[in-house]
Image (cartoon, grey):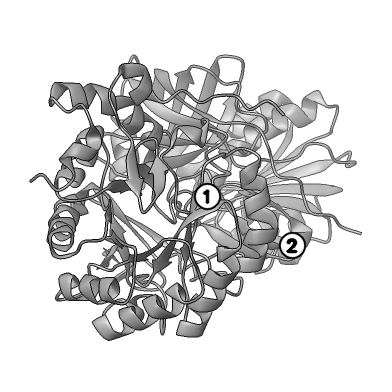
């Protein structure tokens, strides 16, 4: 089969947009965030997704999950709340159906986002995904705000986050990023605990716990009452936390939260991110990640940046 | 044996559409005619997702009708976003995702389909009626509204050549009661049905009629194209997304 080439805007413009995440080289730092890009399939109908640095697939658990009751979505000023609750087909269906389908239109290593309700479940899923050649990095989600007795409860204490990290590292040789929650008092302590437990990188931030009320009905908009707030409104919060964690840890950081432009990507990198995830923006504009990648070289030239990796943590 | 309904595999695209007309039909219902690329719309009952200045999420609105270069939308002003649409004028441009969702299938054996619409669920049935008539079907329509002042498109359906029955909840026009009252009282003869309207109407209709049919559902959406999993529902054939495998589901797959 002849593989067609996807032209990288950075190469065409003569600037260097490449970054390296734990030995995985990305053509550019732009990575659609887990939960906003499915398993890639919905976006391939809009554009050739090989332009991406990579993407983090939908949070996957051991068993198939339907998630929370609807409504699961609430609109906010400059953002949205979701309470999907980790709907996914389960790790076996992902390996059997989603990854082979993804291989037919995405040629790069993908980031596997794994969630769980016990330390054993995280380890089980990561051990299964470790054998998948297509997966370049495992992103362990200890920060989902939408499920009880799981998800975020592992990401709100340094000890629990470290325990998950150790369990996962024991079953995989792939780089492991731990995705952290902003809904904590000291994110630096949790990030450092993960680093000491052997994490290869940190992804942050997941969504911020939020809530809306339908004042006409006098009831919460979301059936599950609360949900995860994302979108441009949380960008300053994300930049601050990326900055704090990147300064306190030696391992690389994937920055996430409210990114919607090439300039935001650069700002997040200056705060200390090696790669930058784009989340909610993909949902309101399906071309968002592509447009950000295409705008990066021009923005770099305007700001006098020749090599994007030079600005990581420069602020 | 029933089989899973195939998912619409058509591509969809974002584009700019120019408003040609934006006119009021009733106190709160408006009709907007947009000019632009309509090639991604492949079935009645599909929807477009509209970006509005100052609002983070797009607004999903069902397609009432379309031709090679125009889309007609009928929408109800229910909040800030739709109120903003109501203030827009001819000549302004809107950013739309088109061709979204799995619409009504007109490939049915039925000869005498009945189209049942409630309130702002009526619009997509117009484009459907036109296509069923083109395919030689004898089309009956039942329109349900709260009161006479809210009625729209009764004449438009008649002009197409449909036999139209109107029901109002307060009895100010037509049959007093719901669409199900009208179907029973008028002893409407049909061998298949298509429905779009509020959830209680769909549920009542589902329980009231024996015939097979297709029903169009509504849910709060994040993206409108299947990525966010915000609008999922359970069916007899597994989990589906109202925005992608829906909004139209077959009667036989629905779990209430």
Label 1 CA crowd tier, 10 Å (few <14, some 14–19, many 20+): some
Foreground: B16 or B168? B16
Residue bearing mark 1: B172
* Residue A94, x across and y down, in percent: 62, 60
Q: Upstream in the sequence, badge 2 or badge 1?
A: 1
Foreground: A282 or B78? A282
At x 31%, y 18%, the residue is: A13
Residue bearing mark 2: B237
Foreground: B110 or A52? A52
Q: Is residue A70 above or below residue B57?
A: below
* Residue B130, x across and y down, in percent: 71, 27
Label 2 CA crowd tier, 10 Å (few <14, some 14–19, many 20+): some
Q: Quadrant of residue A73?
A: bottom left
Foreground: A87 or A51? A51
Closer mark to the observer between disc 2 and disc 1: 2
User: In this rendering, would B20 be left or right of B229?
Assistant: left
**Chain under numbered label 2:** B
**Chain under numbered label 1:** B
Q: Quadrant of residue A15?
A: top left
* Residue B184, x across and y down, in percent: 76, 58
Q: Quadrant of the N terminus of chain B?
A: bottom right
Q: Is residue A192 above or below residue B34?
A: below
Q: Is any part of residue A300 visible from this angle? A: yes
* Residue B248, x across and y down, in percent: 66, 48
Q: Secondary structure at mark 2?
A: loop
At x 45%, y 47%, the residue is: A55
């Amino acid at each position: 089969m002849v593989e067609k080439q996807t032209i990288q805007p950075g190469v065409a413009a003569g600037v260097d947009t490449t970054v390296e995440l734990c030995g995985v080289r990305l053509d550019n730092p732009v990575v659609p965030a887990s939960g906003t890009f499915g398993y890639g399939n919905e976006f391939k109908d809009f554009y050739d997704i090989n332009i991406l640095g990579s993407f983090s697939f939908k949070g996957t658990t051991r068993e198939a999950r339907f998630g929370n009751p609807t409504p699961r979505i609430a609109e906010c000023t400059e953002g949205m709340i979701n309470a999907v609750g980790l709907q996914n087909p389960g790790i076996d269906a992902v390996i059997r159906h989603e990854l082979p389908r993804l291989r037919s239109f995405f040629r790069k290593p993908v980031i596997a986002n794994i969630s769980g309700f016990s330390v054993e479940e995280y380890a089980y899923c990561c051990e299964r995904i470790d054998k998948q050649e297509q997966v370049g990095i495992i992103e362990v989600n200890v920060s989902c705000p939408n499920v009880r007795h799981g998800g975020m409860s592992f990401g709100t204490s340094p000890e629990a986050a470290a325990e998950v990290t150790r369990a996962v590292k024991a079953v995989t040789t792939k780089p492991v990023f731990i995705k952290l929650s902003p809904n904590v008092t000291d994110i630096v302590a949790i990030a450092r605990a993960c680093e000491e437990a052997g994490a290869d990188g940190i992804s942050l931030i997941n969504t911020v716990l939020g809530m809306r009320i339908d004042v006409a009905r006098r009831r919460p908009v979301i059936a599950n009452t609360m949900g995860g707030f994302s979108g441009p409104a949380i960008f300053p919060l994300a930049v601050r936390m990326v900055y704090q964690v990147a300064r306190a840890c030696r391992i690389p950081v994937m920055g996430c939260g409210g990114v919607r432009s090439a300039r935001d990507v650069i700002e997040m990198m200056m705060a200390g991110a090696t790669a930058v995830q784009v989340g909610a923006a993909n949902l309101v504009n399906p071309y968002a990640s592509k447009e950000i990648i295409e705008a990066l070289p021009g923005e770099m030239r305007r700001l006098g940046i020749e090599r994007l990796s030079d600005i990581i943590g420069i602020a | 044996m029933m089989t899973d309904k195939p998912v619409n595999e058509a591509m969809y695209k974002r584009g700019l559409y120019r408003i040609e007309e934006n006119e009021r039909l009733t106190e709160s219902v408006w009709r907007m005619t947009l000019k632009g690329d309509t090639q991604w719309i492949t079935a009645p009952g599909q929807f477009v997702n509209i970006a509005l200045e100052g609002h983070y999420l797009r607004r999903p609105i069902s397609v009432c009708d379309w031709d090679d270069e125009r889309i007609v939308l009928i929408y109800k002003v229910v909040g800030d976003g739709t109120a903003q649409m109501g203030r827009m004028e001819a000549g302004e441009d809107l950013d739309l995702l088109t061709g979204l969702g799995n619409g009504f299938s007109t490939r049915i054996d039925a000869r005498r389909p009945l189209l049942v619409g409630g309130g702002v669920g009526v619009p997509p049935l117009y484009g459907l009626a036109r296509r069923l008539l083109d395919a030689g079907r004898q089309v009956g329509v039942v329109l349900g509204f709260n009161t006479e002042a809210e009625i729209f498109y009764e004449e438009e359906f008649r002009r197409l050549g449909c036999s139209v029955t109107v029901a109002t909840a307060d009895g100010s026009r037509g049959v007093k009661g719901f669409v199900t009252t009208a179907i029973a009282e008028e002893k409407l003869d049909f061998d298949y049905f298509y429905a779009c309207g509020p959830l209680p109407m769909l549920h009542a209709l589902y329980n009231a009629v024996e015939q097979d049919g297709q029903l169009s559902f509504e849910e709060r959406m994040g993206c409108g194209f299947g990525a966010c999993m915000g609008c999922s529902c359970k069916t007899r054939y597994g989990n589906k997304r109202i925005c992608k495998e829906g909004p139209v589901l077959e009667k036989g797959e629905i779990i209430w």
